[in-house]
Image (cartoon, rainbow, N blue to C red):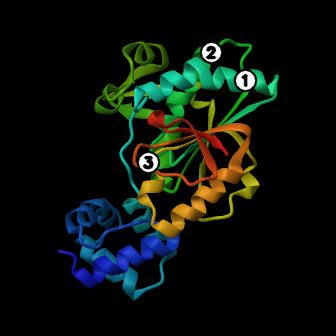
């Protein structure tokens, strides 16, 4: 069992490196998140892993622990009404307003790729006259991004939110899982991003999905990321957040039940 001082150390590490809000009292959560990392790195237990972190300077191991604590649940077309609104209204409107220029879309905290690929499947179904599209998926976790790039999902993962029509059209059975078609995989580019970094080099986006990310950050980090998101939105751009996330006065609510906002 991880002792209280070690849990506090891990929480401080996550806060300093990625702005993550980790409750040191949630010992079961910490144990369950770190157990796979400990096994992968050759430690007997999560307690030994944290002991190694405290005893030596190891950037790779430190980030492995932080990224594990940043893991979040995801699924295809999560909160379906949001994607229905994007497909029927928001994305076609953005394409028309850009007059043939690329429409830039960013899935922030994309996890293992289901959200970004859900967007790609929507874009693939839009008329050829819409777009072109520039779709970016980003996450703090390298392992998440590796799985996203592979585009290989289990039976359980494709059953969570993926319509049968999309499964038939865009996936092929591969062993015990399902492989996403090259056409859809090639529509998304991936990048590891720490949201505490300077994001100005990314340019501006017409649509940003940052769902259930802000709520996992400490208050100061939330403020910093909100500012980055505000600067990342192009004029007329749209931002989608999760039901547990909150925004300040710099954003105007368009459909708050769906988490849809614009820059004020």
- Residue drawn at x 56%, y 21% as measured from the top left: 87
Q: Position of residue 179 (x, y in %)?
A: 44, 27
Q: Is residue 181 visible?
A: no
What is the C-alpha distance between the residues marked 3 and 1? 26 Å
* Residues tagged 2 and 1 counted as in contact (Cβ below 8 A): yes
**Secondary structure beneath label 1:** helix
The residue lying at 82 percent from left, 23 percent from top is 99
How packed mark 2 is, by other alpha carbons closer than 10 Å (few <14, some 14-19, many 20 or more), is: some
Could you give the CA–CA distance between mark 2 and mark 3, rounded to whole angstroms? 27 Å
How packed mark 1 is, by other alpha carbons closer than 10 Å (few <14, some 14-19, many 20 or more), is many
To which residue does mark 1 refer? 95
Q: Residue under label 2, please give it.
A: 126
Q: Earlier in the sequence, mark 3 or mark 1?
A: 1
Residue 79 falls left or right of residue 59 = left
Report helix, strand or loop for mark 3. loop
| Residue 228 horizontal side relative to residue 220, left or right | right
Query: Which residue position is annotated with label 3?
Result: 212
Task: Report the front residue among 206 and 66.
Answer: 206
């Amino acid at each position: 069992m991880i002792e209280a001082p070690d849990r506090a150390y891990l929480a401080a590490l996550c806060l300093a490196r990625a702005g993550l809000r980790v409750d040191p009292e949630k010992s079961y959560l910490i144990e369950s998140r770190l157990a796979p990392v400990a096994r992968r790195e050759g430690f007997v237990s999560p307690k030994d892993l944290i002991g190694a972190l405290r005893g030596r300077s190891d950037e790779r191991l430190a980030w492995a622990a932080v990224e594990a604590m940043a893991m979040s649940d995801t699924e295809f077309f999560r909160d379906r009404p949001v994607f229905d609104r994007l497909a029927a209204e928001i994305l076609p409107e953005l394409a028309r307003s850009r007059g043939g220029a690329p429409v830039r879309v960013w899935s922030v905290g994309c996890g293992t790729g289901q959200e970004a690929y859900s967007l790609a499947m929507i874009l693939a179904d839009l008329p050829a006259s819409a777009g072109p599209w520039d779709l970016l998926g980003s996450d703090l976790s390298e392992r998440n991004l590796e799985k996203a790039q592979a585009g290989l999902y289990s039976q359980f993962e494709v059953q969570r939110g993926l319509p049968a029509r999309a499964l038939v059209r865009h996936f092929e059975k591969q062993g015990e899982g399902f492989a996403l078609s090259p056409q859809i995989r090639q529509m998304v580019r991936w990048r590891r991003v720490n949201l505490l970094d300077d994001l100005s080099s990314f340019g501006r986006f017409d649509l940003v999905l940052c769902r259930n990310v802000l709520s996992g950050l400490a208050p100061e980090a939330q403020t910093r990321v909100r500012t980055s998101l505000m600067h990342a939105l192009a004029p007329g751009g749209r931002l989608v957040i999760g039901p547990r996330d909150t925004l300040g006065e710099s954003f105007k609510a368009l459909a708050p039940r769906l988490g849809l906002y614009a820059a004020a």
